Amino acid sequence: MSIANDSGASVSLWMRTEVPDFPTLGADEADPDVCVIGAGIAGLSVARALAAQGLDVLVLDRGPVAGGQTARTSAHLSSALDDRFYLLRKHFGVEGARVAASSHAAAINEIERTVKELTIECAFQRVPSYLFGSVKELERELPAAAEAGLLVGFVDRAPLPFGTGRALRFEHQAEFQPLEYVVAIAKDAVARGVRIRTNTHVLMVEGGERCEVQLQGGRKLSANAVVDATGFGITSRYDIPIRMAAYRSYVVAFALPHDTVPHALYDDTEQPYHYVRVAADASGRDILLVGGADHRVGQGDPDEAWASLVAWAKPRFPMVGEVVAKWSGQIGEPSDGLAYIGALPGSENVFIVTGDSGHGLTHGVIASLLLPSLIAKQPHEWEALYSLERSKVHGLGTLLHEAIASNIPFRDWISPADVSSVDEIKPGEGATIRRGLHLIAAYRDGTGACHERSARCPHLHGVVRWNSAEKTWDCPVHGSRFDGCGKVLNGPSAYDLPETTE
């Protein structure tokens, strides 16, 4: 057994959960019917559903099970989407907004059904959700959410220890412990015949009647279909990344006296917004999770983000005790607010799950309810809404705004480096240095050894920036992330930072 972690420095409340170890891919293993890349909640849910149809499924991950963003969520399970139903109705029409609500509700129902079927001890429970803040925005959201099929109405206030003012209350939402759930479905997937292979790094996928999967080291596999469930996707170099912005979101966990805050999901309309819920640690002690302070990857200060959450929470929850954990996670924000789940244009029999928009848990389970039909060449009522070929005009203003934010970091190529010499870099820290026209990403490990790679992100050649809180190199263009020594952690890059000799 091991601990789920993507090599970041912060550790979430859930990462203390032990996850089963799985072998690397054997040299003589047979090609599968379907190859799923990514062993988080999306990949494992899809694999389990495909195995139930009698398919031979192989799951590959470069790290452990649930070692990515599944372990870095705040674990809200919500059909009350925070992209606002009045905007979803504008982009997708009344029927599209209805499908968005009903598909997320179906995902929560599927999680609940699976919890009961497998008797998973993951603290799943149904709770209401409250949205408070700008009354004008709440009054705009209420009719759109109700029209989409949610059970929602005004209450005088959210049940929190400070004056929230009038709030919207949404019924039939949920919460759970995500790692306990994922560990259980991983074990069940194996029992259904799924092969899970970790520490196996996929570099490239080529679509076709038989897809080809290229692994690090030169080996190639073939499959009838491939599912890219890596989170940010490694199979779309241009089309998806330019329609999606990468954000970091932050969580601070406080010790909380028992029964002082009701279990529910709480969100406000502030900018930046906040989200709150009550969870429990391994000993059963109540923990208050306060999240938010989002910023573009590589374009903010993590310590300032965590400090802002503490400063927001302390006066509003004066009963809280010590900070017991703090962490950050990565969110893909599509310009029109909904994930992309479906066939990858131009790559026959390649499918992708990406653009979680802060709802990665339910989007991952939606993929397990949708993709088996698409892989079997059967129609599905959700296909058009989540299609990668839906109109690029949706959310055009947001798309242009985020495109500008993505291009500004390219100026780093002509900007001064962080330091003038590697001698200035302290153990456990990283910084860029300039050697002629080249920018170097230099990291000094805890022993004092210095590791140098090119600061050029392999994806679209942005300059990576050092994240001192997570001890990672983050690309501010499209969100690829690498550990201190340059090993890739997050797509869209599938490759490590280049050697400095390149």
Image (cartoon, helix red, strand yellow):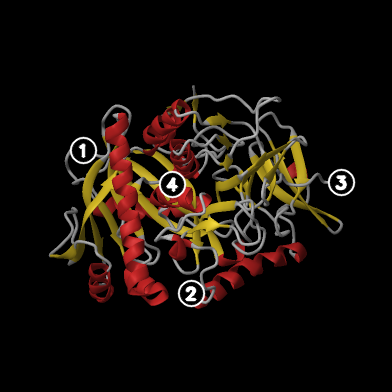
Q: Mark 2 belongs to which amino acid?
A: His
Residue 377 numbered tag? none
Foreground mark, 1 or 4, reads: 4
Which comes before the other along the chain, label 1 or label 3?
A: 1
Q: Position of residue 298 (x, y in %)?
A: 59, 56
Indicate which disc, 3 or 2, sits on the residue closer to the N terminus. Answer: 2
Secondary structure, mark 3, is loop
Label 1 sits on residue: 257
Indicate which label's residue lies in the foreground, 4 or 2.
Answer: 4
Q: Amino acid at mark 4?
A: Ser
Identify the residue shown where x is 86% and y is 46%: 501
Q: Are marks 3 and 2 in contact (CB under 8 Å)?
A: no
Is residue 157 at least partly visible in the picture?
A: yes
**From the viewer's perspective, is the residue at label 1 or at label 2 nearer?**
2
Crowd rating for badge 1 (residues with CA inside 10 Å; few <14, some 14–19, many 20+): some
Q: Amino acid at mark 1?
A: Pro
Expressed as whole percent of the image width and height from the top left, the position of residue 471 reads 60, 42
Q: Are marks 1 and 3 in contact (CB under 8 Å)?
A: no
**In this picture, residue 397 sits left or right of residue 489:** left
Q: CA distance from mark 1 to mark 4?
A: 38 Å
Residue that carries the numbered disc 3 in the rendered image? 501
Name the spot of residue 252 as percent of width and height, x first.
Answer: 38, 46
Q: Could you tell me residue 213's position as x and y percent?
A: 68, 42
Label 1: which secondary element = loop
The residue positioned farthest toward the top in the image shown: 1
Check disc 2 and report the residue beneath it.
394
Q: Dot 4 corresponds to which residue? A: 368
Residue at mark 3 to residue at mark 2: CA–CA distance: 43 Å
| In-front residue for pair 341/480 | 341
